[in-house]
């Protein structure tokens, strides 16, 4: 067992948060208001009694995988692992008013389903599995009242795909939520899941084949599929282009990259209509960029940057790494588009646990596993541990630049890109002592916070990260 750890959940309605602080002997449940001020706290009378941690040992571990909250209660989901085998997914309900804690097994998942992704937000928590025999994904939903529901949805794998099993085709997508500025390290993945209130969009890219979009209404479970064709751009270079896409609002933004140019193709994600193309080639004016292209290498606190002043050099440089496109809306209602490559530098030691985690394949479902084991061999997005705050995410090589778009006309606009919130948080994280434990970084009420335990002072601190807009 870890000596110290912390887990975080936010109620999107009240903006209150629950912080769970634990060690090997006791656990404390702290209710915080929207300004991160302590409202109340309690601990079980007998240390870990009645909590999910009561029966944990060096062999039996609990991995926090997310949850939801509503009506004053908080629902924490934990994956329990016994040795190298899954032992169930459990839900711990925390009532800060009644000062009670209760536990139960969460999902009843058949053995023939394979885990895809676990995530939550906006008062809902999801686990998604794939049934390869039936060609369906299965959504397991936990709402803000602690109630569960399940829905199977048919997914069509295109004939051109070399990945014939649905679980292989969907991979383990990275999760992007509508209320967070994303990090470039996650956008390099070709399988992505975009989550906003009442909606899920799963986007799959394979080379320069049509981009596959699966949209799901999380209230009604109504779904629709769309394949966005890029052949108008790649017909003369089929098989020589790379496409990576990002869903934002009603549109799909696709980076179409080859050795001659960089193109951003903007489509209506419902109709597949091509709305706009922006191209960067050897004749592009460098004044086009809202942030000049740079080659960047970061190793913790040390960052080396070199500007690229020639568009031909930019195209060559972008062709040498894992390409990515991502975006968010800034405070001036401009669409900020980040484009580039991102390749992590291997390091031998690490710090905090990542938000996006691949559970080792030894935890995958097998004949002796419990039914809930299907969700172990998957990725999950954990509240309070965004991927860009991890130790590994501060060691990378990247070529990147930014553009500004008018979200209505989709035309390029002049101006300087705002300071990246992600980069500012990374800079802040690099100043944190390696002795800090039980670390969490979270956003509440449009502010950024960092929490950590100081073992010498025996105190848990929560600091606001001052963000320059």
Image (cartoon, rainbow, N blue to C red):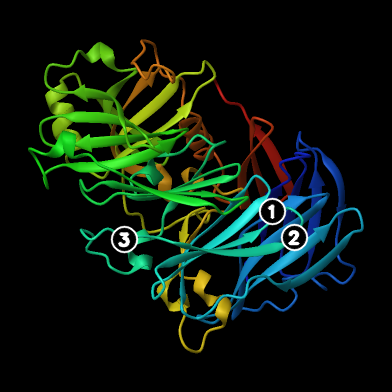
Q: Quadrant of residue 74?
A: bottom right
Using the rendered view, name the quadrant where residue 64 is placed. bottom right
Question: Disc 1 marks which residue?
Answer: 68
Mark found first going from the N terminus, 2 or 1: 1
Q: Is residue 166 in view?
A: yes
Q: Residue farthest to the left?
A: 236
Q: Mark 2 highlights which residue?
A: 146
Residue 333: mark in rendering: none
Residue at x 73%, y 59% (from the top left corner): 75
The answer to whether 449 is drawn above or below residue 414 in the figure is below
Residue 175 lies, in percent from the top left, at 48, 49
Tell me, yes or no, if residue 391 can be seen here: no
Whichever of callouts 1 and 3 sits on the residue coming sooner in the sequence is 1
**Residue contact at pointers 2 and 1, CB within 8 angstroms:** yes
Q: Please give left or right for residue 168 compared with residue 196 in the image.
A: left
Question: Which residue: 80% across, 38% down?
Answer: 37
| Disc 3/disc 2 C-alpha distance (Å) | 33 Å
Count of numbered circles on the image:
3
Q: Is residue 379 above or below residue 202?
A: below
The secondary element bearing badge 1 is classed as strand
- Element class at badge 3: loop
Disc ID at residue 157: 3
Residue drawn at x 74%, y 60% is 146
> Residue 196: image x %, image y %?
56, 41
Mark 2 residue element: loop
Q: Quadrant of the N terminus?
A: bottom right
* Residue nearest the viewer, comparing 126 with 308: 126
Residue at image location 63% in from the left, 56% down from the top: 125
What x and y, as percent, mark residue 2?
Answer: 62, 67
């Amino acid at each position: 067992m870890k000596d110290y750890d912390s887990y975080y959940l936010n109620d999107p309605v009240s903006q209150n948060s629950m912080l769970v602080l634990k060690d090997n002997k006791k656990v404390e449940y702290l209710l915080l208001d929207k300004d991160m001020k302590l409202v109340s706290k309690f601990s079980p009378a007998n240390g870990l009694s009645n909590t999910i941690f009561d029966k944990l040992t060096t062999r039996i571990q609990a991995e926090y995988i997310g949850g939801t909250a509503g009506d004053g209660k908080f629902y924490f989901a934990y994956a329990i692992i016994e040795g190298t085998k899954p032992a169930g997914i459990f839900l711990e309900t925390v009532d800060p008013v009644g000062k009670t804690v209760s536990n139960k097994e969460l999902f009843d998942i058949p053995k023939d389903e394979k885990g895809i992704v676990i995530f939550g937000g906006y008062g809902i928590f999801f686990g998604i599995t794939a049934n390869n025999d039936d060609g369906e994904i299965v959504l397991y939903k936990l709402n803000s009242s602690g109630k569960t529901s399940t829905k199977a949805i048919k997914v069509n794998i295109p004939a051109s795909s070399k990945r014939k099993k649905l679980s292989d085709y969907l991979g383990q997508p990275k999760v992007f939520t509508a209320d967070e500025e994303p990090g470039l390290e996650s956008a390099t993945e070709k399988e992505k899941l975009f989550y906003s209130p009442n909606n899920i969009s799963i986007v799959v890219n394979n080379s320069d084949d049509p981009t596959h979009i699966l949209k799901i209404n999380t209230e009604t479970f109504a779904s629709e599929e769309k394949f966005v064709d890029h052949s108008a751009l790649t017909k003369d270079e089929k098989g020589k282009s790379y496409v990576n896409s990002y869903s934002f609002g009603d549109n799909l933004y696709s980076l179409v990259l080859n050795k001659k140019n960089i193109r951003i193709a903007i489509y209506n994600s419902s109709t597949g209509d091509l709305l706009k193309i922006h191209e960067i080639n050897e004749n592009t004016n460098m004044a086009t960029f809202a942030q000049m292209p740079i080659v960047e290498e970061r190793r913790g606190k040390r960052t080396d940057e070199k500007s690229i002043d020639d568009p031909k050099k930019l195209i060559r440089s972008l062709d040498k790494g894992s390409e990515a496109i991502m975006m968010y809306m800034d405070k001036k209602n401009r669409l900020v588009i980040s484009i580039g490559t991102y390749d992590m530098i291997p390091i031998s030691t690490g710090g905090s646990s990542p938000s996006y985690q691949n559970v080792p394949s030894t935890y995958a479902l097998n004949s002796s596993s419990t039914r809930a084991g299907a969700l172990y061999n998957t990725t999950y997005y954990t509240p309070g541990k965004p991927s860009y705050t991890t130790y590994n995410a501060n060691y990378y090589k990247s070529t990147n630049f930014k553009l500004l778009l008018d979200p209505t006309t989709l035309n390029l606009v002049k101006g300087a890109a705002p300071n990246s919130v992600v980069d500012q948080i990374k800079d802040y994280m690099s100043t944190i002592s390696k002795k800090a434990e039980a670390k969490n970084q979270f956003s509440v009420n449009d502010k950024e916070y960092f929490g950590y335990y100081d073992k010498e002072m025996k105190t848990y601190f929560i600091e606001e990260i001052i963000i320059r807009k």
